[in-house]
């Protein structure tokens, strides 16, 4: 096995498609080197070493040391410098780089190789003692923090003391002698704190840093990040060792971060930030406010753009931007450094972007001919669309803007202000919506950012930690809001005009404008035309699965149709029973002593049900509508309060005590497995008869009076035995035919069932003799296959997911290995009996991308999901088909 891959001077042992082995950063450094871009030479230690390191009790493979030495020699030869040399020393950076990018989650060491001797060489080579000692003191700070695990604040404090003593404000105001003195103090302090010397030997330094990078793979924030982003621990990280280039050697030096297109809007313009005379992490760390790269969007008062300050470098960088986009055919996120007027590329990767930007970039790149429309469809993650489908702030609403920052990640968020990640997490656990307000965020805050509705920071640019992480999470974020002053001690912040916002006060963030607004602001629905509409056209061209919606009201049906629903896959009629105008009649029906009593109540409900169905059919004109007959345990409709019982008793002309006894009698210990679903129809046929009558009368009236085409699909829930369906189907057909004859119109209708019990899946061949369609009710099927109560699982299921006993919450993503096999079997058996049987799914999984893809592969005809998830399901279906 080969453990170390060299890159430099136009030649690389690795390639861009070797991300699994070299990590994202390493693979792309190799690729950039091969296509002739200026990349400082270096080498990558593979992710396999990381995996073996952890497998073998933190021991490296035996050959590693020799390979590292060999590649280091190659770098030395190429650079004409020697690691540890006192005349012309090579200094290196050591960075992590996993397969998937994990921004800021793991450790980095810069300027490695410096000691009291090599610093002399750097002085000789650069002719700049101040620069040499500044690099040295930075190295000691980073190394003692990252590798030796000493509290970083300790040395930071010495630095602050020094500045105070010298009466200066900025690090850059310290002289070479100040910094030289600091180096001595730093080392003394390290010895004092840790009881051992700061390592002078460059080789020891190098192995220390490599070990720290591998070690950081298992640090708590990396573990949290992996969990949130479904990155397996087995992947491991690579280590990149690369010769240093310097952005901090003077005013002809700079360092920057850029995106080849705007990551927030997707606009095709070179978006980035840089700092003159700065090193590596300074831009991202948000310590100084960076300047723009491009002057296209320059406004008066903005800091000067790189295009004006360093025009030659800018021209070179702009050319590289083109080369990279044409090569990778995707928007790139790049890091670069300029050393004495010479440009070096330190990183490129596919840039993270907002959902808006993802759609715009995909559509633009298809139009520009960079990619085809299939690729365009694949460029947008289905789950990402969620961001686009949710409301944004109503532009017409009155609002009191109390501050303005950078529009770092779009969307609108509203909640109570909290000032720490832990508080955010605790509040969210109690069901509160919060906005996390920080001076700046660091990777330690990630759990709080996840829990918050939105994030507001006082410091940092568009590429600051807060901005990058929030965009990745699809969370609204306003960053670098200089208008606010955060006071953690007082748990408050001060905004423009001295407005004080205390912990618990409500604010609204607009991540698209950067506005911070007092109180709560109304929102509006998203725009579904333009680029989004174009993308969805391509989506519809390639997908095979139809997408319907679960909707119980005309309003939901309307929204879903605007989102592209091709019918209703599930109307839960019980939701209609809870409305204020009928709940009394429903209760009367349930609590009646006999058929006659029930029929009396049902006659009151019939006209209301009928008008519900008319509303739904109208919204879904020309499309199939599946209506499910009553499903939930009667138990759920029972009156609870004494006042409700008293009122009902009067209507029904019985005593309150009689009713109470009846309520008691109907109480069930395990209602989910009790008197529900088709069991209601079997024992109280008049209930289903009324519903079927309502459905068919609604259809007939519309057909007769409004010239409609409508094909009602009547669905019978919780069937486990074909005889149940045979009986209920015969009843339904009788009622349908009676209504049709009465209206004298022609109506086609289907009668089918839900497959939501394991026995139904196992006997689907028999059930298909009666059923004209199946709809897999994977909510109940998951519940009954796992023996996992939908209502009670919340107490332990999160623990199961967290400890990876289950890979996912099976109520969210379909369990393909178990429940999915029952669905697959149900399809096969159903089709064996009735080849043209219509097959769909209406459990929550119908809108979850991985489940939709599974449904495509087992050959369902359609998925059905909540209105807001319809576009997500359409896109997932297209991904499955491509
Ligand atoms: C199901 O069980 O998957 C289903 C759609 O029905 P409900 O969620 O109403 O039980
Ligand atoms: Mg169900």
Image (spheres, rainbow, N blue to C red):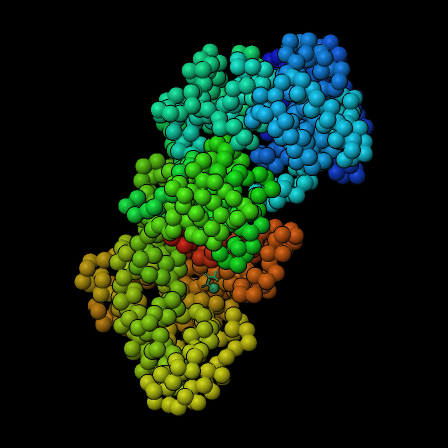
Residue in view at x 39 percent, y 90 percent: 655
- Front residue (pair 534, 229): 229
- Front residue (pair 90, 423): 423
Q: Where is residue 350 in the image (x, y as percent from the top left)?
A: 51, 29
- Front residue (pair 650, 622): 650
Residue in view at x 47 percent, y 14 percent: 310
Is residue 518 at all visible to an observer of this figure?
A: yes
Residue in view at x 48 percent, y 40 percent: 485
Which of the 4 image quadrants contains residue 90?
Answer: top right
User: Relative to residue 44, is residue 491 depicted above or below?
Assistant: below
Q: Where is residue 749 in the image (x, y as percent from the top left)?
A: 32, 62
Image label count? 0
User: Relative to residue 584, is residue 182 depicted above or below?
Assistant: above
Q: Where is residue 102 in the image (x, y as percent from the top left)?
A: 59, 36
Quadrant assignment for the N terminus? top right
- Front residue (pair 217, 21): 217
Q: Where is residue 64 in the image (x, y as percent from the top left)?
A: 77, 26
386 vs 104, left or right, is left
């Amino acid at each position: 096995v080969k453990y170390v891959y060299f890159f430099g001077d136009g030649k690389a042992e690795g390639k861009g498609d070797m991300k699994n082995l070299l990590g994202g950063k390493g693979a792309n450094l190799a690729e950039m080197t091969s296509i002739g871009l200026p990349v400082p030479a270096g080498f990558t230690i593979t992710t396999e070493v990381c995996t073996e390191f952890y497998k073998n009790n933190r021991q490296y493979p035996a050959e590693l040391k020799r390979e590292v030495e060999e590649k280091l020699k190659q770098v030395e030869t190429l650079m004409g410098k020697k690691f540890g040399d006192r005349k012309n020393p090579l200094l290196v950076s050591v960075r992590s780089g996993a397969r998937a990018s994990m921004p800021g989650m793991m450790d980095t060491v810069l300027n490695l190789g410096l000691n009291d001797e090599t610093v002399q060489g750097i002085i000789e080579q650069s002719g700049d003692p101040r620069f040499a000692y500044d690099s040295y003191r930075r190295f000691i700070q980073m190394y003692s923090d990252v590798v030796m695990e000493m509290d970083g604040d300790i040395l930071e404090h010495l630095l602050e003391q020094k500045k105070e003593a010298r009466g200066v404000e900025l690090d850059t105001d310290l002289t070479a002698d100040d910094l030289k003195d600091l180096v001595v103090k730093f080392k003394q302090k390290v010895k004092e704190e840790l009881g051992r010397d700061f390592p002078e030997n460059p080789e020891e330094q190098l192995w220390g840093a490599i070990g720290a990078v591998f070690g950081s793979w298992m640090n708590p924030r990396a573990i949290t990040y992996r969990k949130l982003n479904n990155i397996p621990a087995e992947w491991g990280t690579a280590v990149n060792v690369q010769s240093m280039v310097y952005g901090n050697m003077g005013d002809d030096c700079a360092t920057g971060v850029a995106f080849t297109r705007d990551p927030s809007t997707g606009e095709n313009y070179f978006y980035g930030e840089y700092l003159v005379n700065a090193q590596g992490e300074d831009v991202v760390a948000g310590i100084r406010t960076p300047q723009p790269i491009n002057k296209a969007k320059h406004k008066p008062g903005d800091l000067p753009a790189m295009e004006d300050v360093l025009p030659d470098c800018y021209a070179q960088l702009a050319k590289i931007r083109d080369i990279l986009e044409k090569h990778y055919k995707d928007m790139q996120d790049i890091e670069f450094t300029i050393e004495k007027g010479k440009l070096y590329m330190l990183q490129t990767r596919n840039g993270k972007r907002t959902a808006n930007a993802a759609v715009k970039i995909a559509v633009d790149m298809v139009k520009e001919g960079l990619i085809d429309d299939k690729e365009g469809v694949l460029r947008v993650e289905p789950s990402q669309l969620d961001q686009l489908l949710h409301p944004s702030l109503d532009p017409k609403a009155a609002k009191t803007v109390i501050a303005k920052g950078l529009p770092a990640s779009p969307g609108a968020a509203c909640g109570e202000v909290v000032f720490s990640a832990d508080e955010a997490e605790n509040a969210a656990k109690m069901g509160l919506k919060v906005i996390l307000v920080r001076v700046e965020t660091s990777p330690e805050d990630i759990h709080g950012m996840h829990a918050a509705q939105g994030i507001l920071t006082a410091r940092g640019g568009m590429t600051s930690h807060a901005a990058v992480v929030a965009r990745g999470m699809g969370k609204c974020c306003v960053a670098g809001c200089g208008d606010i002053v955060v006071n953690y001690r007082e748990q408050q912040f001060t905004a423009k005009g001295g407005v004080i916002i205390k912990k618990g006060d409500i604010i609204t963030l607009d991540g698209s404008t950067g506005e911070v607004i007092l109180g709560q602001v109304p929102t509006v629905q998203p725009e579904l035309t333009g680029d989004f509409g174009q993308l969805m056209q391509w989506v519809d061209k390639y997908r095979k699965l139809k997408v319907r919606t679960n909707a119980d009201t005309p309003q939901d049906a309307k929204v879903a149709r605007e989102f592209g629903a091709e019918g209703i896959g599930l109307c839960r009629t019980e939701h209609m029973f809870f409305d204020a105008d009928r709940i009394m009649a429903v209760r009367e029906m349930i609590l009646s002593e006999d058929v006659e009593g029930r029929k009396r109540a049902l006659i009151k409900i019939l006209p209301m049900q009928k008008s519900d169905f008319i509303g739904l059919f109208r919204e879904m004109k020309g499309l199939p509508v599946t209506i499910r007959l009553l499903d939930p345990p009667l138990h759920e409709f029972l009156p609870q309060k004494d006042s409700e019982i008293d009122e009902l008793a009067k209507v029904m002309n019985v005593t309150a005590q009689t009713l109470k006894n009846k309520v008691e009698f109907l109480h069930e210990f395990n209602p989910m497995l009790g008197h529900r679903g088709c069991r209601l129809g079997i024992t109280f046929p008049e209930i289903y008869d009324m519903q079927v009558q309502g459905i068919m009368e609604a259809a007939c009236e519309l057909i007769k009076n409004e010239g409609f085409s409508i094909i009602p699909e009547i669905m019978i829930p919780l069937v486990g035995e074909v005889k149940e369906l045979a009986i209920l189907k015969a009843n339904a057909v009788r009622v349908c035919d009676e209504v049709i004859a009465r209206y004298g119109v022609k109506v086609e209708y289907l009668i089918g069932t839900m497959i939501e019990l394991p026995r139904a899946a196992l006997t689907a061949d028999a059930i298909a003799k009666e059923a004209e369609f199946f709809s897999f009710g994977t909510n109940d099927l998951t519940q009954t296959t796992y023996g996992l109560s939908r209502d009670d699982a919340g107490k332990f299921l999160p623990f199961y997911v967290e400890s990876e006993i289950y890979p996912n919450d099976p109520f969210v993503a379909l369990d393909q290995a178990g429940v999915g096999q029952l669905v697959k079997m149900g399809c096969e058996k159903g089709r064996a009996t009735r080849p043209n049987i219509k097959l769909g799914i209406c459990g929550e999984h119908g809108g979850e991308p991985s489940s939709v893809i599974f449904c495509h592969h087992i050959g369902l005809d359609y998925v059905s999901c909540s209105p807001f998830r319809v576009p997500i399901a359409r896109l997932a279906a297209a991904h499955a088909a491509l």
